[in-house]
Amino acid sequence: MIWSDAPCWTTCWNGGNNFQDAVRSANIEFYMIQHIWMENDCNFADMLLPITTKFEDTDIATDGDNGAYNVVFYEENAIAPRGEAVSDMHFVKMVAKRLDERFGNEPAFEDIYNKYSENDRSDDEWLKLGFESNIASEKMTFEEFKDVQSYVIPTRENWEEEPAGLIGFYNAPAWFPLSTPSGYLEYYSTALAQVFPDDVERGPIPRWVDESPEHQDRITSERAKEYPFLLVSNHPHWRIHAQFDDVTWFREIQTCKITGPDGYKYEPIWINPVDAARMGVKTGDVARLFNERGSVLGGVYVTERIMPGVVYQDHGARTDTIVPGYGGLDRGGANNLIAPSAVTSKNCAGEVTSGYLVGCEKVDVFALAAQYPEQFNRPYDPDTGLIAESRFNLD
């Protein structure tokens, strides 16, 4: 069983087609997802549970992360929860209560509801607990905080007299060492040299590595004869991963979506005019990005803003599966599906979602539609993309 509250693997991480094949496996008996949006992986859920948005929840928030913030504010809900939606915490409490009722006599589940909910602490009690853990509680009561709804933390008095950061190391590095193994600034990583002495990819000194056992994705590699373009795939300008891919006024912008000859709004593929002339494509055509892991479609956008030999397509488009699985075809342009599965190197778990080899060629979408009539005729709105009913049971 998989229980997920982050169903966006196929547009946030690498190796998307491998992931989709994995969740299709008969070894996964049940896939339950709790989420706000109809993200891509929700298509595979056996049970999909609606979770409230920030507009429906009441909470306490700050304007920063990692303990550094300037403002604490009370987030009163703007609307009541829609339909049957509940917060993540309330849903988990419901599961805990059901487990408690059914398996409460077993040690693993004994009193699990009270342990999780801290004896059924109410939402307001949780908020008060959060309030009491920050500096605002030293200046006002919780009821006063809910009334004024924010507290701006004042600048520290005499902050100009505070010593500069790392001033101790600057003045006396032997007495105030850094947290590096040597205590000094390191251009040669003594830790990497000690822990991974035989790692030729990620050695103690940064250097260019053209190929590795995990990756042959340079234009100098043998694979480039079959896949001659480097794909650049950035975080998108018009959305956050796949979120907001269905916002109507964003999709009106040319660099957000390209309207193909079939009226479908495709994820743009930026192509240099030199390559476009050689390939016989123009802005508004539909092209296929492909490698051995599969293919994704996109709308051609010819521009000097991308160099020859490179194509550019943002990551994060909503999937629209035409042929499922490894080696398959996606109409939506979710290029994480064809990104390498291997991480950056054997000792570095960085994802590889940009700068890998693809082929690029013009396609006849009407011929594809004739070949896959059911997939090309799903209920679709050009202003928002696939409608919700279309996204269920996409194989």
Image (spheres, helix red, strand yellow):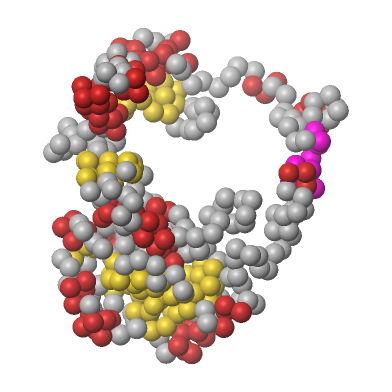
Task: Identify which residue is drawn at 59% across, 57% down.
Answer: 344
Task: Identify which residue is drawn at 64% across, 51% down.
Answer: 347
Toward which corner of the image does residue 287 lie, by quadrant? bottom left
Q: Quadrant of the C terminus?
A: bottom left
- Provide the major secondary structure of the magenta segment: loop
Task: Identify which residue is drawn at 71% across, 63% down.
Answer: 208
Q: Does residue 83 appear to the left or right of 361 in the view shown? A: left
**Residue 184 lies within the magenta run:** yes
Toward which corner of the image does residue 389 lie, by quadrant? bottom left
Q: Which residues are magenta?
A: 182-192
Q: Does residue 108 appear to the left or right of 48 in the view shown? A: right
Toward which corner of the image does residue 363 lie, by quadrant? bottom left
**Residue 317 lies within the magenta run:** no
Residue 127 sits above or below residue 268 on the image: above
Task: Identify which residue is drawn at 24% across, 37% down.
Answer: 52
Near-viewer residue (70 or 177): 177
Residue 286 sits above or below residue 349 on the image: below
> Horizontal and vertical percent for residue 288?
39, 77
> Horizontal and vertical percent for residue 155?
55, 22
Q: Does residue 14 appear to the left or right of 202 in the view shown? A: left
Q: Quadrant of the N terminus?
A: top left
Near-viewer residue (230 or 352): 352
Q: Can residue 316 be seen in this snapshot?
A: no
> Horizontal and vertical percent for residue 272?
50, 79
